[in-house]
Image: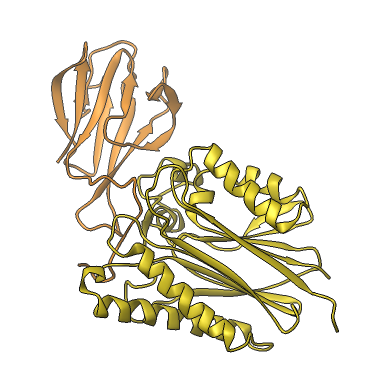
Chain colours: A yellow, B orange
Amino acid sequence: MSTKRFEACVCTDIGRVRTRNEDCGDVWLGSSASRALAMVADGMGGHPGGDHASRSALDRTALAADAGLPGRRPVEWLRQMVLDANRAVRSEQIRTPSHARMATTMVALLATGSSVAVAHLGDSRAYRLRDTRLTQLTTDHTVAQAMLDEGTYRPEDLARSPYRHVLTAGLGLEDEPEPVVARHRSLPGDLYLLCSDGLSNAIPDGEIAEILRDQATLATTATSLIAAANAAGGPDNITVALVRRLY
Amino acid sequence: MATLALIVDGVVVQHFELNTPKTLIGRAADNQVRIDDLAVSSHHARVERIPNNYLEGIYDYFLQDLNSTNGTLVNGSKVERVQLQPNDEIRIGWNTFKLMDDTRPGMEQTAYILPGGD
């Protein structure tokens, strides 16, 4: 069948404050666009090699994608891919001593048939727009989120928390991290967004939803998201990857 | 060590050490921070000191209003319960306090915790 099931797009921008883009992201379409893979990685600022860490994760993901996107067992495939990417970052740490403390977040989405699998470590996020409703599919691995989960924080404490950017999980921190991998049913018309915190910290979810709801081409949507984050000061690198299920 | 500094005309006139899990602020004699001001309720507010489960050696301070008559303000907004940050301005009656905490590192940039310590 020649009709595409998925379309995808990726866009990254340095933002307006940082002097280097430590984010990475890419998208792949497999088997005549009947499957799609997207990933975003945010190298951790303030540590030498942050850009190398996210690049290692991206390279490892590309390697897996080039070998073919799987039609079955997407959760297991995605989990393995994230663990392989973590191993790649760990190897790079050993090879390059000046990058021994480099680390990165990672969020990846594999869309096959009528399901999507989402894996993440850190505070890079996955969202789904279904009809007009935006749903966050990932829960940030931050101290602030953990304090909310344990009951120390109430939801209204999050915005003011000094621990919003303190991560409890990522690639390059340990040999066997435990990525959170979840499978969701997808519907025709679903629009999926993966992003670094350069987007989600810069503009509120409501503004993200508004831009996604415009039903523009994916390229226009991606550039609008980045423009909105930059208009809000562009405090960090911004990366967005979009996957739309067409039918 | 974190303290609550009482500020008058921009000058710190008194430090109250936050060295117990709960520090009571009010007009009555049994408060650790006792304020002689009719605009302050007898038990007006409380600072809770909670050890952070994720960051070793870090304490978090939460300010809780105890249904006071005139309310508790942080940076000009009425609050029920908030986590205090260094240099937050706390208004209780006619009194202004600031949280002073020299143990807390700056965390505006992304950082991470190494599993099992570093």
Q: Quadrant of residue B38?
A: top left
Q: Is residue B103 left or right of residue A90?
A: left
Location of residue B47 with respect to B10 vertically, above or below: below
Q: Is residue B43 visible?
A: no
Residue, far front: A19
Q: Is residue A7 left or right of residue A233?
A: right
* Residue A188 x/y as whole percent: 81, 68
Location of residue A20 with respect to A82 vertically, above or below: above
Of A88 and A166, the residue lying toward us: A88
* Residue A85 x/y as whole percent: 43, 79
Location of residue A202 with respect to A9 vertically, above or below: above
* Residue A228 x/y as whole percent: 59, 42
* Residue appearing at x 25%, y 79% in the figure: A94
* Residue appearing at x 47%, y 80% in the figure: A60
* Residue appearing at x 26%, y 69% in the figure: A99
* Residue appearing at x 25%, y 21% in the figure: B28
Q: Quadrant of residue B25?
A: top left
Location of residue A49 with respect to A68 vertically, above or below: above
Q: Is residue B93 visible?
A: yes
Quarter of the picture holding the C terminus of chain B: bottom left
Of A216 and B29, the residue lying toward us: A216
Q: Quadrant of residue B1?
A: top left
